[in-house]
Structure formats: structure tokens, C-alpha cells
Amino acid sequence: MKTLLAQPGFLAPSGTIGADISYLLALVFTVLFLVSWGMAKKAQGTRHHNLILVSMVAMIVYFCAYYYARQLGVLSFEGREGFGGPDDIYENIFVPVLTTHLCLVVLGMILAFYMLSQGFRASEKVGGDYQLKEGPLKVSSRRFKIVMLTILGCWALVQVLLLVFRESPFGASVAYALIFATVALVASLEKLIEKLLPDGAKRHRVLGRTTMIIYALILVTSTATYLMLYVFYPAES
Ligand code: HEM
């Protein structure tokens, strides 16, 4: 698989199949998200919800397959060897663009999960079509406790599995502790978001638009990274 992905690509003279496929899929997913934004703007709540769900699931499957196939050999880890341009462009343009891209991807993923559940909570079916419910939307303190305890329980389960199946689980334990702490932090941000944007429908629109703008920026930064790596400054081979 790795050899196949490293074969010459079809988009740019210096690209690889892996880079070209991943760029094209990123393009397709972003366009799907933006089309589903257009549907929401035209008040087509159910079509918007269907397209968002399908593209989210496809995007997650793609991310898992991609990271598995390339074994984390993503652009960021190719580092300086993948970039054939001058040092000042590398330091002042390539690294900041790539760092911004990675931060946006992390933020976009967190917001996508949040928005999916918020979308269901903030809307209701009226005559077979999803519509946003105007009015305050709050998580009850009982449900909040259940969410926190579930996160704690999953973390404890992962710890036990690591202790049983791994010989030296320290590094993985720290990584999982950080991941679960982030999940708990994001879940607890809900209380702050409730204070800032109490109306569920308004919250969905404001955070939904922010998420869509982040997706558009992810496409801009990934296009810039692709062009720099494979069109303007390919590494000498
Ligand atoms: C990643 C997930 C999601 C994002 C980024 C998102 C984004 C948006 C945005 C930006 C709007 C407002 C459009 C505008 O006026 O500019 C919107 C409206 C809406 N969304 Fe979502 N959404 C997501 C998930 C969902 C889900 C899962 C549902 C339903 C279960 C849903 C139901 C709705 C409805 C009913 C509207 C109102 C459409 C209307 O104005 O009639 N959304 N969404």
C-alpha cells in the first residue's frame, strides 16, 4: 500500500498518488460541506442534515484509512526533506501555513462532533422536515454528569486495556490521558457556550457558520501546502 501511494501522481508533475488522492478527497469533502451550508441557507433542514451526516462519516472513514495507510506519514512529518524551496520561504511561509492548517483541522474536527450533536438537540421534525427550535437550549445537570462520568469511564477502560495488553504503557497512557482531558474540556465548554449563546437555534447558526468558514480555510491552507510541496518547490529527487 505504501509503495502504491508513493507512485507518481496525476495532478502535478512531482506529486504522489497518496498526496493527490488525499488532496482530491479533501476538496470533495469541503465542497460537500459548503453545499450543505447552501441547503441550510435555503431552509432545507433535512437535506442539510442528511448531507452533513454522510459527508462527516465518509470524512472520518477516510481519515482513519489515510492515517493507517500512510502510518502518520502526513505532510507535516515529511518535514524539511519534502520541501525543496529556499530556507526563508520554508520558515516564513511553509511552516506557518502548515501549522495554521493543522490547528484548523483539529479545531474543525472538534467543532464537527460538537455541531452534529448540537444540530440534533437544537432542531425538531415539523411535518417531516428538520427545523431549528428557537428558545433556550441547556444540558440538564443530570445529563452533564452522565456525559462526564461516561468520559471518565471510557478513559478508565482504556487504561485497564493498556495495562493488560501493553508491555510499557507509559507513553500511550499519557497520550490517552491528554485526549480524554481534551474531550472533557470541550464537553465542559458547553456550559460556557450556553451562557454566551443561550438560544439553541442562534447557537447552531453562529457556530455552524464558524465551522463552515474553518472548513473553507482548511481547503485554502491545504491547497497552498500542496502547491508548495508538489508544484512550486518540490524536493530534488
Ligand atoms: C457539522 C455539523 C453541522 C454544521 C457545520 C451545520 C451548519 C449549519 C449552518 C451554518 C446553518 C445556518 C445556515 C445559514 O443561515 O447560514 C445551519 C442550519 C440548520 N441546521 Fe445545521 N449544521 C450541522 C449539523 C446539523 C444537524 C446534525 C442537523 C439536524 C439534525 C442540523 C439542522 C439544521 C437546521 C434544521 C438548520 C436550519 C435551516 C433553516 O434555516 O431552516 N444541522 N446548520
Image: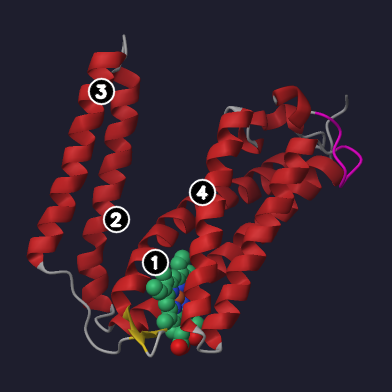
As helix, strand or loop, the secondary structure at mark 2 comes to helix
Residue lying furthest right in this view? 13
Q: Residue under circle 2?
A: 186
Q: Which residue is more in the foreground, 221 or 198?
A: 198
As helix, strand or loop, the secondary structure at mark 4 comes to helix
Place of residue 123 in the rendered image (x, y in percent of width and height, measured from the top left): 33, 80
| Circle 2/circle 4 CB separation < 8 Å | no
As helix, strand or loop, the secondary structure at mark 1 comes to helix
Quadrant in which residue 94 is drawn: top right
Place of residue 154 in the rendered image (x, y in percent of width and height, measured from the top left): 22, 38
- Label 1, label 4: how many angstroms apart (C-alpha)? 15 Å
Going by the image, does 155 lie left or right of 33?
left
Counting residues from the start of the chain, the first of labels 1 and 4 encountered is 4
Q: Residue at x 75, y 47 (%)?
A: 226
Q: Nearer the viewer, mark 1 or mark 3?
A: 3
| Circle 1/circle 3 CB separation < 8 Å | no
Residues packed near mark 4 inside 10 Å, few (<14), some (14 to 19) or many (20 plus): few
The region drawn magenta spans 7-14
Counting residues from the start of the chain, the first of labels 4 and 3 encountered is 4
The circle drawn on residue 161 is: 3
Place of residue 1 in the rendered image (x, y in percent of width and height, measured from the top left): 70, 25
* In the image, residue 123 lies in the stretch drawn in magenta: no
